[in-house]
C-alpha cells in the first residue's frame, strides 16, 4: 500500500514527534552523558547532534557531561553523572566502516558494564562476521544496552545478532524542524559523496546549470575565527564542561549553516548523502535521491520520508541530474515562469 503524499510542513513535525516518542520510551532517569561529539566537517553529523540536543533541551534533560573521541575521560564522566546513563551520538557509524567510532563504542560497553547505555539512532553495516561477533559479545556482557536504529534492515540485523533492547526510531536531525532556505542561484545543486560510502565510480562532467560538490571541506579562516571566539569565552567561563558544550554548539551550528547554504543554492538538489536528503526535506527543496554504498539512504527513505511530495529516486548520477533538471522545469511551468 502506497503512503499518501505529504508536504514538508506536515511530514517534518510528524517524524520529529516519532523521534521524540521513540527516545522517551528508552531514556533512563537521572543524569546523562552525551558522548562521541562529531568533531569533524561532515555536516550531517552536526545536524544529528543539534537534533539530539534540541530533544534533550525540550525534555529538560541536558547532559552533565559531553565528550568527543579526542577528549573523552571515563573518570571525569563518572564524577559528572554518578550512576547515570550514557547516550552515544547517533549516525551511520555502527559497524566496520568507521572503525574509530566502533572501537569507542566497544570501549564504553566493556568499561561501564551494567550502566545504562543508549545508542541514539544508527544505521548498521558490518563487512564480516568477526566484527559482528565482537560487538555481540560486548553487548551481551554489558547487560544494559539499548540500540535505536533508523531503518528496517538495521532493525532486523540487530534483532538477529544482538542480545539487547532494539527499537526503530527516525533520525535526530528531524528535531531541528522546518528550515528557511535562501534564494536559489542555480538550477541544480548536486551534493555527492566523495568518501568510501560513495556508490559506484561515475566521473563525468556536469551539464551547465549544475553545481557538483561535497560538504567535507571547511573554510580554514572561519575555523580560526571560531577558535579565537572560543578563547575569548574562556576568559569568562571557569566550568570546563560549559566551555566544552559552548565549543561543540558553536562548531555544530556553523557546520549546519554551511550545509543549509550549500543545498539552498539549487532550485532542485541531487544527493546520495542521507542528511543532504533530510536537510533538503527541512528546507522543502525538491530533490532526487541516490543510494550510498550499502543501502543506508534508500532504507531510511523507504522507512520514513518516502511520502515527501518533493522526493524522487534515481539509480545513476546522470539519471538523477537529468531528473532534477526536469523537476526544475516542471516547477517553472507550474508557476508560469517557463
Image: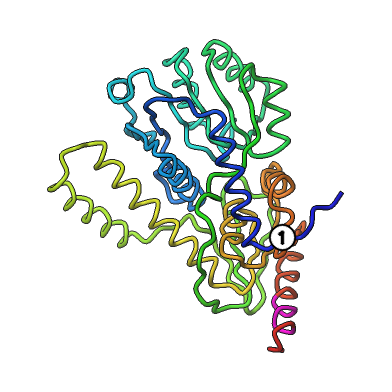
The furthest residue to the right: 1
User: Which residue position is annotated with label 1?
Assistant: 6
Q: How many marks?
A: 1
Which residue is at 37% across, 17% downward?
A: 83
The span shown in magenta is 328-333
Q: In the displayed structure, does residue 105 sit left or right of residue 293?
A: left
- Left or right of 323? Residue 197 is left
Pick the residue in front: 309 or 191: 309
Q: Secondary structure at mark 1?
A: loop
Determine the image quadrant of residue 145: top right
In what quadrant of the picture does the C terminus appear? Answer: bottom right
Q: Is residue 92 above or below residue 85?
A: below
Residue at position x 56%, y 64% in the image: 283
Q: Quadrant of residue 149?
A: top right
Q: Residue at x 54, y 69 (%)?
A: 264
Which is the main secondary structure of the residues drawn in magenta? helix
* Figure check: 124 above or below 293: above
Q: Is residue 120 magenta?
A: no
Give the x, y percent position of residue 6.
72, 60
Task: In the rendered view, tell whether residue 308 sits above or below residue 333.
Answer: above
Q: Residues within 10 Å of mark 1 (few under 14, many from 20)?
A: some
Residue at figure coordinates x 55%, y 28% from the top left? 26
Say whether residue 329 is magenta.
yes
Classify residue 207 by image quadrant: bottom right
Image color mode: rainbow
Residue 324: x and y in percent read: 71, 70
**Percent of width and height locating residue 200:** 70, 51
Please indicate whether residue 234 sits to the left or right of residue 129 in the image.
left
Amino acid at each position: 500500500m502506497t503512503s499518501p503524499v505529504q508536504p514538508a510542513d506536515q511530514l517534518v513535525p510528524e517524524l520529529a514527534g516519532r523521534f521524540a516518542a521513540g527516545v522517551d520510551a528508552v531514556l533512563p532517569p537521572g543524569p546523562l552523558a552525551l558522548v562521541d561529539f562529531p568533531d569533524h566537517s561532515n555536516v550531517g553529523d552536526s545536524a544529528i547532534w543539534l537534533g539530539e540536543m534540541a530533544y534533550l533541551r525540550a525534555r529538560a534533560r541536558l547532559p552533565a557531561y559531553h565528550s568527543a573521541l579526542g577528549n573523552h575521560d571515563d573518570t571525569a564522566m563518572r564524577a559528572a553523572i554518578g550512576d547515570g546513563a550514557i547516550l552515544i551520538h547517533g549516525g551511520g557509524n555502527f559497524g566496520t566502516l568507521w572503525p574509530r567510532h566502533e572501537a569507542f563504542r566497544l570501549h564504553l560497553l566493556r568499561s561501564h558494564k551494567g550502566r545504562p547505555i543508549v545508542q541514539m539512532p544508527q544505521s548498521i553495516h558490518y563487512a564480516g562476521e568477526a566484527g559482528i561477533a565482537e560487538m555481540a559479545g560486548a553487548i551481551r556482557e554489558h547487560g544494559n544496552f539499548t540500540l535505536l536504529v533508523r531503518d528496517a534492515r538495521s532493525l532486523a540485523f540487530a534483532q538477529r545478532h544482538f542480545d539487547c533492547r532494539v527499537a526503530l526510531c527516525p533520525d535526530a536531525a528531524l528535531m531541528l524542524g522546518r528550515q528557511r532556505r535562501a534564494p536559489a542561484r542555480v538550477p541544480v545543486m548536486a551534493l555527492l559523496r566523495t568518501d568510501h560510502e560513495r556508490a559506484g565510480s561515475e566521473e563525468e562532467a556536469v551539464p551547465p546549470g549544475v553545481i557538483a560538490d561535497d560538504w567535507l571541506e571547511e573554510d580554514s579562516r572561519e575555523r580560526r575565527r571560531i577558535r579565537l571566539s572560543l578563547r575569548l569565552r574562556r576568559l569568562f567561563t571557569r566550568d570546563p564542561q560549559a566551555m566544552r558544550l559552548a565549543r561543540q554548539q558553536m562548531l555544530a551550528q556553523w557546520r549546519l549553516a554551511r550545509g543549509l547554504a550549500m543545498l539552498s543554492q539549487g532550485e532542485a538538489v541531487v544527493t546520495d548523502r542521507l542528511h543532504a536528503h533530510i536537510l533538503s526535506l527541512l528546507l522543502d527543496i525538491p530533490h532526487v535521491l541516490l543510494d550510498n554504498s550499502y543501502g543506508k539512504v534508500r532504507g531510511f527513505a523507504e522507512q520514513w520520508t518516502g511520502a515527501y511530495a518533493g522526493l524522487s529516486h534515481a539509480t545513476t548520477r546522470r539519471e538523477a541530474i537529468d531528473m532534477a533538471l526536469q523537476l526544475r522545469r516542471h516547477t517553472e511551468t507550474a508557476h508560469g515562469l517557463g
